[in-house]
């Protein structure tokens, strides 16, 4: 069966499965005529008709996998269904510290999409960025590929290579990109004084150790005379929810930071601890589409408590509690069982964080040679616009807002 026909079958079955199975879930609280078993029966009938009446006999394994992954993506772009073989491989490797390319992933339109990259990683150096789509990994199409399994394919031995086919945001034709796996390390924070006694802190990733470094940097900037602060969280997609809560608490002496809640997970509030706050200086927070997870939990908390003005672009939307749930067939699903919410009750994973002042930033393109390798710029090349505070339009707008508030 050629790829075009397979694509059609899997796409059709995915859509049908999503509509019918979501209907069955919604039907649990509806009238008897919306009995979930009725929807499942219709789904079974559709699958049977595809098998017996389609122009040629389809690959039913692909149809089923497409339906399952389509259903999961419709409700949770970070979910995965792993068949027994994939789940066994996943459990074998998930705790190993293997070399990686530094991609943070989600599902988009059935394919694997890029949430962000680990700064300094092979993926970051190749210019992969938020909203790029990965069409293939090692020649295997990512359509209906479990997200967790895609992550495994990207890992391996240090200095080994992996080839990707990537569709970039502004380039319609797929590009072949070859990445060399490496042991990843998180970059340090950047802290400096800008004109007008404004302290600037750039954060590319979060961890418990980096949150402590941020607290120390704030203290140092205040001793140097900082009267206002700019916290740059753009393209910060690395870090746990706990790191985001700890970051927000550095600036909050009271109030609700966030809460988590799910269908079977009771609400848990995370309140600011006054003993952990280190500054009360006026604050602006910068975000973009690559701000995700811990960073957007912090941004939502600081905006929701009216502690900071948030400037930039809407964040990605990735803040949930995920669990692995084993299935009777020996496989498993990885699913969000609870979401983190902003102080005003919005699910961050659903809505992201929209700044009070929206300012777009320019895209930075990285050229790729005929072998799929990134073409390096000259050593003296200027930093990316979003990280150069002195002439950055988003930073300038934040400084204007802080000056107006004085």
Image (cartoon, rainbow, N blue to C red):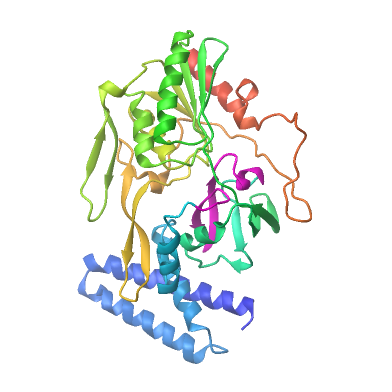
Instruction: Say left or right for 158 vs 174.
Output: left
Quarter of the figure that contains the C terminus: top left
Q: Residue at x 24, y 75 (%)?
A: 35
Q: Residue at x 36, y 67 (%)?
A: 332
> Between residues 19 and 160, which one lies in front from this camera angle?
160
- The answer to whether residue 109 of the structure is visible from this angle is no
Instruction: Say left or right for 115 vs 163.
Output: left
Q: Residue at x 22, y 65 (%)?
A: 29
How far across and how far down the image is residue 250, in percent? Answer: 36, 24
- Is 122 colored magenta in this rendering? yes
Name the residue at the bottom extreme: 52
Instruction: Say left or right for 46 vs 359.
Output: left
Quarter of the figure that contains the N terminus: bottom right
The magenta span reads 98-126
- The answer to whether residue 367 of the structure is visible from this angle is yes
> Between residues 54 and 31, which one lies in front from this camera angle?
54
* Image height of 43 relative to 311, above or below: below
* Image height of 179 relative to 153, above or below: above
Instruction: Say left or right for 140 vs 28.
Output: right
How far across and how far down the image is residue 118, in percent? Answer: 54, 43
- Is 61 colored magenta in this rendering? no
How far across and how far down the image is residue 179, in percent? Answer: 65, 53
How far across and how far down the image is residue 357, in percent? Answer: 49, 29
Q: Quadrant of residue 138?
A: bottom right
Number of numbered labels in the structure image: 0
């Amino acid at each position: 069966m050629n790829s075009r026909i397979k694509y059609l079958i899997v796409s059709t079955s995915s859509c049908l499965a999503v509509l019918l199975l979501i209907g069955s879930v919604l039907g649990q609280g509806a009238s008897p005529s919306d009995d979930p078993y009725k929807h499942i029966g219709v789904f079974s009938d559709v699958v049977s008709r595809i098998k017996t009446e389609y122009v040629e006999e389809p690959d039913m394994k692909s149809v089923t996998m497409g339906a399952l992954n389509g259903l999961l993506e419709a409700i949770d772009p970070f979910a995965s269904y792993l068949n027994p073989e994939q789940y066994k491989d996943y459990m074998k490797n998930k705790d190993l510290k293997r070399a990686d390319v530094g991609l943070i992933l989600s599902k988009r339109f059935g394919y694997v999409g890029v949430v962000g990259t680990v700064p300094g990683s092979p993926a970051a150096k190749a210019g992969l960025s938020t909203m790029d789509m990965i069409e293939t990994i090692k020649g295997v199409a990512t359509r209906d590929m479990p997200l967790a399994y895609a992550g495994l394919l990207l890992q391996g031995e240090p200095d080994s290579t992996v080839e990707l086919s990537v569709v970039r945001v502004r380039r319609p034709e797929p590009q072949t990109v070859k990445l060399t796996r490496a042991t990843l390390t998180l970059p340090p924070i950047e802290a400096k004084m800008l004109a007008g006694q404004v302290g600037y802190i750039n954060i590319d990733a979060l961890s418990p150790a980096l949150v402590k470094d941020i607290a120390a940097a704030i203290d140092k900037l205040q001793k140097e005379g900082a009267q206002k602060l700019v916290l740059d969280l753009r393209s910060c997609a690395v870090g746990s929810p706990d790191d985001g809560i700890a970051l927000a608490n550095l600036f909050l002496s009271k109030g609700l930071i966030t809460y988590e809640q799910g269908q079977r997970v009771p609400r848990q509030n995370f309140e600011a601890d006054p003993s952990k706050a280190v500054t009360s200086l006026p604050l602006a927070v910068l975000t973009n589409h690559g701000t995700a997870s811990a960073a957007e939990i912090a941004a939502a908390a600081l905006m929701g408590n009216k502690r900071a003005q948030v400037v930039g672009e809407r964040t990605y939307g990735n803040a949930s509690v995920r669990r692995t749930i084993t299935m009777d067939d020996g496989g498993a699903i990885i699913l969000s069982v609870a979401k983190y919410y902003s102080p005003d009750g919005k699910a961050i994973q659903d809505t992201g964080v929209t700044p009070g002042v929206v300012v777009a930033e320019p895209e930075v393109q990285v050229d790729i040679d005929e072998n799929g390798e990134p073409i390096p710029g000259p050593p003296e090349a200027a930093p990316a616009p979003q990280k150069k505070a002195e002439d950055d339009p988003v930073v300038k707008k934040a400084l204007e807002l802080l000056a107006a508030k004085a």
